[in-house]
Image (tube, coloured by chain):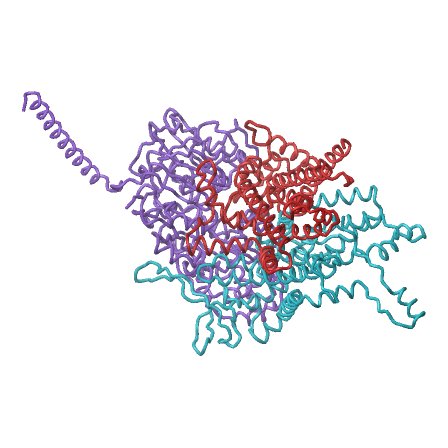
Amino acid sequence: MAEPATELTLDSASLLAAEEHEIAIVGRSPWYLAWRRLRRNWVALFALLVFVLIVLACALAPVYAKHVAHTGPNEVHAGEKVIVSGKPKEVVGGGSFYDPKTNDFVVKPPEYLGPTWWHADGRFVLGTDNLGRDVAVRLLYGGRNSLMIGIGSALICTFVAVFLALLAGYNRGWTDWVVTRFFDLIWAFPVLLLAIALSSALAVNGFHHFGISIEPGSLWIPTLVISYVLIPYIGRPLRGQILSLREKEFVESAIGAGAGPLRVMFSDLLPNIASTVLVFFTLIIAANILTEAGLSFLGAGVRLPDPSWGNLIASGEDQIQTAPWLSLVPGIAIVLTVLSLNIFGDGLRDALDPRAKVRIEH
Amino acid sequence: MTARRRGTWLLGVVALAAGISMMVAAYGVAATRSQAAPQNAQKSVGTLKAVLDTIDFLDPQQAYTGQSWWAMWNVYETLLTYKHVDGPAGYQLVPGLAQSLPKISSNGRVYKFTLRPGLKYSNGKKVLASDFKWAIKRGFLATGQGVGFYTDIAGAKAYAAHPTKGGNISGIITNNKTRSITVKLSTPRGDFLTILALIFAAPVPANTSTAILNGTIPATGPYRITGYDPNRGFTMVRNKYFKATKYIPRGNPDKIEVALIGDANTATQRVISGQADYSNGAIPPDRIANAKSKGNLVLRQTANTYYFWMNIREAPFNKLKVRQAVNYALNRATMQKIVWGGLGQATQNVLPPTYPSYKKLTTYSYNIAKAKSLITSAGAKGAKVTVWTRDVSDARDAAQYYTAQLNTIGLDASLNILPRATYYSTVGNVATHAQTGWARWLEDYPHPLDWFDVLLNGNRITNTDNNNYAWYTNKKTNSEIEGLKKSQVLTPAVNARWAKVEKEIMAQAPWAPWSNRVFPEFFSKKMGCIHVQRLYGIDLARLCRK
Amino acid sequence: MLSFVIRRLIGMVAVLFAVSILVFIIFILIPGGDPAERMAGKNPTPENIQNIREKWGFDKPFYVQYVRMMQKAGTGLLPGTHGEYDILRSFDTRQDVVAEIKKGIPATFSLCIGAGIIWLVFGILVGVISAVKAGRWSDRAITILALIGISMPVFWLGIVLRYFFAETRTWFPDGGYVPLSEDPAQWMYHLILPWFCLAVLFIGFYGRVLRSNMLDTMNEDYVRTARAKGLPPGRVLGRHVLRNSLIPIVSLFGLDFAAVLGGGAILTETVFDLKGVGWYAAQSVGGLDLPPIMGVTLYGAFFIVVFSAAVDFAYAYLDPRIRPT
């Protein structure tokens, strides 16, 4: 059975020692120890850096759009020409056309402008999509949407799960039974179906009741739907942990001393599950980004024409033979983001777990 | 040799001679026969493996998609049908189950037909005149999708209000002994013959159940349907009770196996790899040149128009200047390229060029500056607009382009994508207050009334399931359309009047039409003799293998 | 034990009931278009629409409609032919929902059982190897590969696999499902890419969970005792470490397998054009077609509830320390 990570700090002992012998024994809190371990794990730190860079790049999407690419994410440039390395090229060229001499169509595939890298003054750095829109701009804006939904839904999920786990673990009995059944209900409910259904249902008019107003294209719909999916996934283990903590003497004694439920939950239970929650949080962000991509792929997440990494992959599928980068690049972006989160989360878990086999002594 | 051996030898020679002469004779007969009927080509098709993207129903009183009709044209015959020829001559109405074209009274209200003698269904039962009446009644009873066409038959409106199995439609009188069918209209309609040729009016055996029967209703055409598996496919085999006539030929394939594959790439691959002979689905533009090199690509021009409607009841489209601005903001040539890869023709007309009344309109050139100034002078800058479209890839692409252009000229546009199944009923509902959106119309039958009366006649606007998505009404054009309803034949004078109506309507710009699409029909390299009937598509009667 | 079983069974039924009510409420109360108007087609008369409303019972109050819908769902499970209005029928195609789900079962079961076997076997393999070689380069390499596996969106992997192996080089067929009864060789040939695609995600995940469990177990006192006793390391691994580490894997597998079997492989089925239950679900949900949605949701929820209860029973049986709730 896994024991929670509680170590007695040496603060009180060190104070005593300092008083007696005036030698300072420096005590270290478990957080500091974990930080020291993490610092040595350069792979995890590198992953964190990658993630932060991606977030930064996506947050700066409007800056890129305005000053580098000179176009918005939804603007169509299909009929225009762009100067690439001094030569004008059509953004969307080729294509079939009607030949009046033969009274028939000449069949040709359309030619989409490929990645110009920096040869076109920052325009169409990663090429164009089938409607003549700048892929790099859409990629960054799409990342913005995907990350907002991923992180937002992870926050909501974590809060709700911690709250329910505390409720169930502290009160036990009937409350526990209800919360567990509630977890079962959420687990049995198919998220994709719900997301697609809600998205379609709210497509016509949005939701304007109870003082809340949600427009049809709002990002709140996918955020709220995705946030509920993994509540049981972290709620159940947290509840288990809290149940076993509840039996410990320090909790019993706190209750016996007259501490109210809120006090016990916040001062005694919460700090001891904090490291688990932190690790879960990073992993939930990763999982939610993948879920959002799946929903957007099916048309139920971020709605066109607004980009999201998932719907960029879906839109690019039809052009995969002439412009494979349209589907490949957003996928690579997702893999990089989620992978860096997973590696960092892994490193975090290793650092926070004092019983890890591979330990970094100091 | 011995006597016996000699006898055997002689026998052998005689047998050989007989065999050879029989073969020569047979070849001669076959040669003459094939010369006599050149439309049945030498190499038989055997089993045709076809791929369709989707069908809605295989029930004659229910089916309302081009794909279903392509199959059912060869299964359920109607009183009148269309000629099996290419080009505009394929719009000519000829007798189908009827002996000849009907006698029409001078006031245009009474139509008299006689059914051909000796007609049988694919289950051997006789086809009776009263079966035609049952088919129309069944349409109302089963709440079929096409019943709106037949409400001008006398007594039909009353019947539709409370349809019962035993009830009567006074305007249809049949006599099974004389095989006569008389149809009386409450008001004359110039397009009534074409309406009778719709598959909705195909006779079915008396008392056929009103539940949706996909493929189990006995057939009157060259084929009958067996083995329908929803979402997956169906099969058509020869109807042994069918007798070919001058106008309805026997089909070439002995059997047609249809697979339903919604994914365009998979369907195209099937034909390229040889697993299927034919696919009717859209081919993604970037694959189309590849497909052409690996197979036999036929481009089919049908009567269709793709357009964006603008609801003249809802701001900002209640202002003419705004509607004109939208028309100036669309680069129609570019739209053909980005939506169909170039397989379409730019248009600003309501009717497609297949109509004799077609006069090309070129009012709106692509001019963003002019569009912007029109929007500003109309005071519509920054107006919030929701664009509606349905969840099919070409509709999504076209609508994204449209939305981007609306934003460029100064409106504040966003896009709302609805599922395929609910799109039309949502934007056709007055409660939605839809401002503008995507639509297309494929002709049901070759008559301008199928366009103007259904889509742009203010008198036919309904609050739900409305087809006039622009909610367009105008006293002058409404009355002109009503007047033209009575004209029986499309004479040049009548056509000139239709052209005038079209010009007047487009001057009010309730629509921004943008394309007449060209549909790809994709065959494997082994298929030949591909003929396209204007209305129903690939003609099975003339298909052959190379 | 018996009271535990009974309470669990009641819980299962309660969950199924709650799921069906939730689905129903979402669809009836949130506006999504009048079903009667949808079914009436392109040229209806108002009488048509009213007819449809009466025949299908759309004019009745919502609780009556709910009861009728549940009745229809039940009737659909009984053998024999049924009348037009007695069973659950799609609003759009009027087809028998239960029959359609049954048709999708072979494809879904083929995909999920095959992928399930692959991911269980390989997941365990990966977990054991990386636990035994913990800290060395082989462990690091396997960890990175596993992490990449769980970081890929499954539909993207499917598109990429299709593009590289079925379209530009035709090593594999480009999607589609061939029934086992029709041609076993083709059946397997068509499923190889989808199996791989679906399994990759789970192999990484299971491998890491098993690795972490095994490392925890290997630190336990009784393992140290076993080694101190002089038992060969293989025996320690097999009998003591693995047996205990596998218990959480079993519960995870039970739930994940139930989820994909219950229609959770929507994305894989869509990308590879396997017309299974997940594919059917995606078709009908986009169209807000309530009867198929209800049918598919209940079907999926049923599997999850059954498997989750089975896992709980197994746990309670295997580990008497675990107190059932």
Residue C191 x, y percent position in the rendering: 49, 45
Residue C178 x, y percent position in the rendering: 46, 41
Which residue is at 30% across, 60% downward? A102
Viewed as shown, does residue B307 lie left or right of B1? right
Viewed as shown, does residue C177 lie left or right of A286? left
Residue A205 x, y percent position in the rendering: 65, 53
- Which chain shows up in purple? B
Q: Is residue C40 visible?
A: no
Residue C216 x, y percent position in the rendering: 71, 52
> Which color is chain C depicted in?
red
Examine the image and state in which quarter residue A187 appears.
top right
Give the vertical position of A125 relative to A334 (above or below).
below
Q: How many marks?
A: 0
Q: Nearer the viewer, residue C183 or C97?
A: C183
> Which color is chain A depicted in?
cyan
Give the vertical position of A349 relative to B147 (above or below).
below
The quadrant the N terminus of chain B occupies is top left
Examine the image and state in which quarter residue A40 appears.
bottom right
Q: Nearer the viewer, residue B377 or C10?
A: C10
> In the displayed image of the protein, which residue is found farthest to the bottom?
A86
Examine the image and state in which quarter residue A107 appears.
bottom left
